[in-house]
Image (spheres, rainbow, N blue to C red):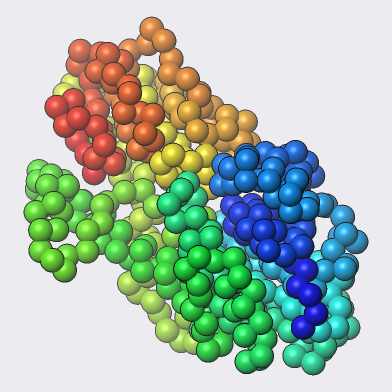
Amino acid sequence: MKTIKIAVIGLGYVGLPLARLFSTKFETIGFDLNESRVNQINEGCDTTLEVDDKLLKDAINNHGFRCTTKIEDLKDFNFYVVAVPTPIDENNHPDLTPLIKASETVGKIINKDDVVVYESTVYPGVTEEICIPVVEKISGLKFNIDFFAGYSPERINPGDKLHTVEKIKKVTSGSTPEIADIVDEVYNTVLINGTHKAPSIKVAEASKIIENSQRDVNIAFMNELAKIFNAMEIDTHDVIEAASSKWNFIKLNPGLVGGHCISVDPYYLIEKAQVYGVLPRIMSSARHLNDGMGEYVANQTIKLMNKKGVMVKDAKILILGITFKENCPDIRNTKVVDIHHTLNEFTNNITIYDPWADVDQVKKEYDIEIVNNLPENELFDAAILAVSHDKFSDINLKSLMKNNSVVYDVKGFLDRSIVDGRL
């Protein structure tokens, strides 16, 4: 193959870190439809905080990395990497619209002997059965004759500064053995811990989808245990600590399962499995259980308030955190909104404090008002620690609470002496 020139399509939590990394070894351009996002990146700023501004500016100034919204800027490149979201609709069915539109984009500029690699999480078969036919139709080129494909599933963990993209061992695959070698070599060029070359694109697709489905099932088991032990008035975290003293116990904690991976990806495999006549009962039950944990936390808080004689109606409630996980600004599919919606049936006096989340973005996405600074001179009837941001460890929560109040700790993060209940 001629000299590799990489175009990354989709510059979100996955695409930008990957494009920046590729730019250290290859001529690289990023493409996104969001003009403000592209402008910010070209100025050396990543609002997702996944790429350090110094690294980004180094890529721009010293490696020629740039981003664009103009499709014609991609025509001289020959290795296309698609890293767009794969969401679900309101009925939890896969929404492949972003992937199809990205494939149309590739089809407009792909040339003979070029390669397109997909990173988006999908069920087995999407790349070759849905995406590639779109590229063929738009380009007029024949798959595995005129152009080729690969699949290398993303493994970005938002907010994780330890397992960054260059340190992640990635699965790779290609539409022919020769292309599989080329794709594998390209990724190996920039990855510290190398790759695992899968025998087919479908195997690579399946490997990604079960990574997150496994975590979803395991967390659902812990959430179910939490419900059982809470009913028995046994502290779940104490039980887990005791059980984890056994050498082969897998230690996980109960919690809210949000984000764009664990709370979404299993639905892709669930839907595809049913096409083949298989009803994935464990995965479906896990999704149902995990999706209901926000409401459960709210109801547990209400139960504790009633026990202490705290009036729930019109109560002043503080929720700490709205992002889907700690120490990152990502609010995608956060289940904290379910806590808010359930409590909102009883009171409008709910304050959500999150120093990481973007106020305008939360308002636009969920129509919920949040604050980036703790309210002064306010006392609350109840508080829920929903996200364990490091910054929350500095809060003197006791000083914010009324004498007769309730503190509920979703994450097992707070000093137990001030906590009335925890998941």
Where in the figure is residue 82, as x and y percent of width and height? Answer: 69, 66
**Residue at image location 53% in from the left, 89% down from the top:** 199
Instruction: Give x and y (percent) for residue 95.
Output: 62, 64
Examine the rendering and report whether any part of residue 264 can be seen: no
The total number of labels drawn is 0
Q: Is residue 173 left or right of residue 117?
A: left
Looking at the figure, which quarter contains the N terminus? bottom right
Q: Quadrant of residue 350?
A: top left
Left or right: residue 408 versus residue 361 is left
Residue at x 19%, y 56% (from the top left corner): 225
Q: Seen from this angle, which residue lies furthest top? A: 377
Residue sitting at 77 percent across and 58 percent down? 29
On the image, the x and y values in percent for residue 340 come to: 42, 35
**Residue at screen point 61% across, 54% down:** 17
Up the image or down, 352 lies above or below 116; here it is above
x then y, percent, for residue 77: 82, 69
Above or below, 68 against 273 in this view is above
Left or right: 144 with respect to 196? right
Give the residue furthest to the front.
62
Q: Choose between 110 and 347: the one closer to the eye.
A: 110
